[in-house]
Amino acid sequence: MSYKINSFIASEKEVASYEKRLSICLTSNGFSFSVTTVQDELLAIGDVECNLKASMSEMIADIKGALSDAHIQPFGLKEKELVVFSRQFVWVPQHLYDEKKQRGYLEALCTIDAGCCVAVDYNEHIKSYIVFSADNGIVSAFKIAVPGLAVRCQHSKMVNATVLNNSEMKSVLLMNVRNGEADFAVMCNKKLQISNTFDCANFDETIYHALNLTKHFHLEDALLVVAVCGDIDRERFARLREYFPSVALYTGRSLTLTKPEMQHLPIYRSALILS
């Protein structure tokens, strides 16, 4: 066994498999996961440390072992998804999308990294497809360990009904802070303006990119809410409030917590698996 479950909390509530959703998100040293119901109840959430550079067989064994230890059987579930982080992606409106040209959309913008596959995810909220690259070995390991797993990109998860509805008659700048990088999405009046990922060696650079986006889209002249999730602490949150009048923690869609202990979880750190 080469994996370690760093955190895990689950409800004892019994729910039929076909009413459950399993969401898995890659992290810098493994993956996090959540189990929710179709009625938006949070049943379980956890974080697993494992080597995503190990051999295919080792990764598969770790994934299966960790989910089994968490009493998660990935069969018969309503939905199953894997959220990956991609720097190579392009949005294509539904009316322009041609499945036969899927790889070509991405190759027109960049050279696809070696060892990567091309995946596509449809975002019904903005009626567009996002074509993106993902590590082929990691994706294959998870899809073998969890059959029927849909692969999704972090940018598609950030453009969701919760954030879009909150952008009505105002602008929302959503930031997902990660180690060495930060993902951004700007939404105004229920429309996506831009989504991108930038290198951020420190939090000052994260703030710089946030300010640059607000200036480029003239957001400083309108009602703006900055929503932030990921690697955030009190100090970083306070820093953001020095530059933006309205800052809030983003925790994904509104969920019913089925266990009192869940009230104290820093859910904003795992917002993408709860969106």
Image: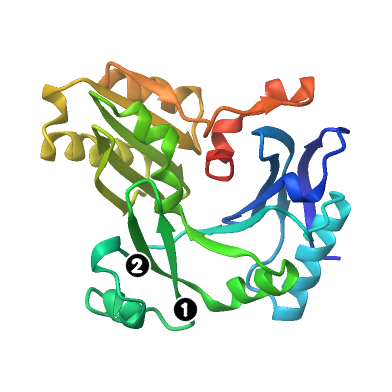
Pinpoint residue 141: horizontal percent, then vertical percent: 67, 74
The amino acid type found where label 2 is placed reads Gln
Display coloring = rainbow
Whether pointer 2 and pointer 1 mark residues with C-beta atoms closer than 8 Å, the reply is yes
- Disc with the residue nearer the chain's start (2 vs 1): 2
Residue 67: quarter of image: bottom right
Image quadrant containing the N terminus:
bottom right
Q: Is residue 143 above or below residue 255?
A: below
Q: Residue furthest front?
A: 95
The amino acid type found where label 1 is placed reads Cys
The reply, left or right, for residue 128 in relation to residue 43 is left
Q: Is residue 273 above or below residue 207?
A: below
Q: Residue at x 47, y 59 (%)?
A: 85
Residue 220: quarter of image: top left
Q: Dot 1: within a 10 Å radius of its alpha carbon, few (fewer than 14), some, or many (20 or more) residues?
A: some
Q: Residue at x 35, y 77 (%)?
A: 102
Secondary structure of the residue carrying numbered label 2: loop
Residue 239: quarter of image: top left
Q: Is residue 135 above or below residue 205?
A: below
Q: Nearer the viewer, residue 127 or 243?
A: 127
Q: Which residue is mark 2?
A: 88
Q: Which residue is mark 1?
A: 116
Pinpoint residue 94: horizontal percent, then vertical percent: 30, 61
Q: Residue furthest top?
A: 245
Pinpoint residue 52: horizontal percent, then vertical percent: 64, 68
The reply, left or right, for residue 68 in relation to residue 102 is right
Q: Residue at x 56, y 27 (%)?
A: 254
Marks 2 and 1 sit apart, C-alpha to C-alpha, by: 10 Å
Secondary structure of the residue carrying numbered label 1: strand
The reply, left or right, for residue 34 in relation to residue 204 is right
